[in-house]
């Protein structure tokens, strides 16, 4: 008979997963247990994790998963990515994942739009864990309104001269390569381009940011003061960067959805363990009907969202890009996470509120999941527009 915790491992019962998926899940679970979980509390308190973790992640194939072999990667499917996001949630520290996997949003525009020279120069060292990649889109004044960004790149002969700033940039302090959205043309989406900017460019500076959650994530504001960037670093065609940015969001939102579900499952797991061990008023906490109902509702929401995620992942593997449903799925997943984090905290009481608890960490990171990759309000509006409402 399965234990309650084994029953929560939904991918073990899904028809979408095969033997190689199970093998990767087990490999990654062991790696997380060895290389992250014993140290994650200290990393969170320190506000960073060792750079050596990138190399270790590369060695087991984590950084290269889903990337072409010619760049040092290993091709995969959306279900491998789902497993990756959910297993990486088991340690409970979203900040570690955000920075360790920032190449997942920094490199795709280069892969999709960049020149062969740019791909060969940038992608392999990042996948090898030798360099770090970041995406720099958000600005203090524009926020999620990408079409309104004001950082400029003025063409002067064989260079672009970049001026402006970015904020809330993951891996912002120690990244080596930044995929930066700049304005090379007129107002609106039609004037936006993407540039690859190296960290050692003169006039490029950074300041760290302190956050409510994601403590172990390196997050920063970036400043460009007459930064000269060679035209060879243009990613794709000039003034055609907006489409590349938008295409990048779909993959990011699927990944955030899977991660939010992974964190939700952690909340349920820890709440179940606590409810079975803790005794109140002469019986186990789990023997109180109100507690059982909380746990059942958590499982219900996780199961529904997981099923929707897997259905969309299958459709994506068939070549579809269901933009509206991806947007709404992200909302569903972050609402599920918010519910599960709150209810797990309520079940565990003071024990869940203490530092060092996975629940405490996840609870303070709920909002960043709802905001990152497009806020819940933006996701709903995007979906409505896609539906022709």
Image (tube, grey):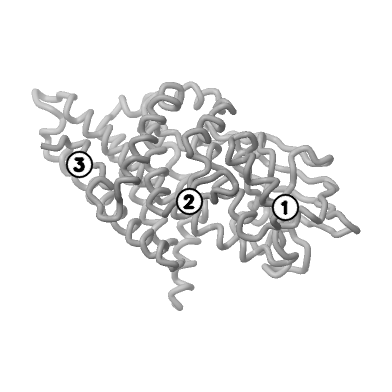
Q: Is residue 235 visible?
A: yes
Neighbour class for label 3 at 10 Å: few (<14), some, many (≥20)?
few
1 left or right of 270? left
Neighbour class for label 2 at 10 Å: few (<14), some, many (≥20)?
few
N-terminal of the pair, mark 2 or mark 3, is: 3
Task: Identify the secondary structure beneath mark 3.
Answer: helix
Residue 7's disc is 3
The reply to whether dot 1 and dot 3 touch (C-beta < 8 Å) is no
Residue sitting farthest toward the front: 70
N-terminal of the pair, mark 1 or mark 2, is: 2
Q: Quadrant of residue 206?
A: top right
Residue sitting farthest toward the bottom: 388
C-alpha separation, residue under disc 1 versus residue under disc 3: 48 Å
The x and y percentages for residue 389 are 44, 77
In the depicted structure, whether residue 267 falls above or below residue 246: above
Q: Mark 1 — residue?
A: 117
In the depicted structure, whether residue 358 falls above or below residue 124: above
Q: Quadrant of residue 144?
A: bottom right
The x and y percentages for residue 61 are 48, 39
Residue 75's disc is 2
Mark toward the viewer: 2 or 3: 2
The residue positioned 33% from the left and 61% from the top of the image is 311
The residue positioned 23% from the left and 42% from the top of the image is 8
The residue positioned 48% from the left and 21% from the top of the image is 42
N-terminal of the pair, mark 1 or mark 3, is: 3
Residue closest to the eye, 371 or 37: 37
Quadrant showing the N terminus:
top left
In the depicted structure, whether residue 336 falls above or below residue 352: below
The x and y percentages for residue 242 are 65, 64
């Amino acid at each position: 008979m399965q234990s309650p915790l084994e029953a929560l491992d939904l991918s073990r019962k899904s028809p979408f997963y095969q033997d190689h998926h199970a093998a990767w899940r087990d490999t990654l679970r062991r790696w997380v247990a060895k290389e992250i979980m014993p140290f994650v509390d200290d990393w969170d308190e320190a506000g960073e994790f060792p750079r050596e973790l990138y190399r270790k992640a590369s060695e087991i194939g984590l950084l290269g998963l889903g990337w072409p072999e010619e760049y040092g990667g290993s091709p995969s499917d959306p279900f491998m990515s789902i497993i990756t996001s959910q297993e990486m949630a088991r340690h409970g520290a979203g900040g570690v994942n955000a920075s360790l996997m920032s190449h997942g949003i920094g490199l795709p525009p280069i892969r999709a739009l960049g020149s062969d020279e740019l791909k060969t120069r940038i992608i392999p060292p990042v996948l090898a864990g030798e360099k770090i990649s970041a995406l720099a889109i958000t600005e203090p004044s524009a926020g999620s309104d990408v079409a309104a960004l004001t950082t400029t790149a003025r063409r002067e002969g064989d260079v672009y001269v970049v001026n402006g700033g970015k904020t809330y940039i993951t891996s912002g302090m120690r990244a080596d390569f930044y995929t930066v959205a700049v304005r090379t043309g007129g107002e609106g989406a039609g004037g936006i381009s993407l540039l690859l900017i190296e960290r050692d460019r003169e006039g490029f500076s950074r300041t760290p940011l302190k956050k409510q959650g994601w403590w172990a994530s390196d997050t920063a504001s970036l400043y460009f003061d007459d930064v000269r960037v060679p035209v060879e670093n243009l990613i794709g065609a000039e003034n055609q960067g907006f489409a590349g940015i938008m295409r990048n969001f779909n993959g990011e939102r699927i990944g955030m959805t899977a991660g939010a579900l992974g964190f939700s499952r952690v909340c349920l797991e820890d709440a179940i363990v606590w409810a079975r061990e803790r005794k109140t008023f002469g019986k186990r906490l789990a023997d109180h009907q109100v507690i059982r109902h909380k746990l059942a509702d958590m499982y219900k929401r996780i199961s529904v969202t997981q099923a929707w995620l897997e259905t969309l992942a299958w459709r994506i593997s068939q070549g579809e890009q269901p933009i509206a449903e991806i947007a709404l799925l992200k909302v569903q997943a972050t609402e599920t996470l918010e519910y599960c984090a709150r209810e797990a905290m309520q079940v565990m009481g003071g024990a869940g509120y203490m530092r060092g608890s996975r629940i405490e960490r996840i609870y303070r990171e709920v909002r960043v999941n709802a905001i990152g990759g497009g806020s819940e309000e933006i996701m709903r509006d995007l979906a409505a527009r896609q539906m022709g409402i």
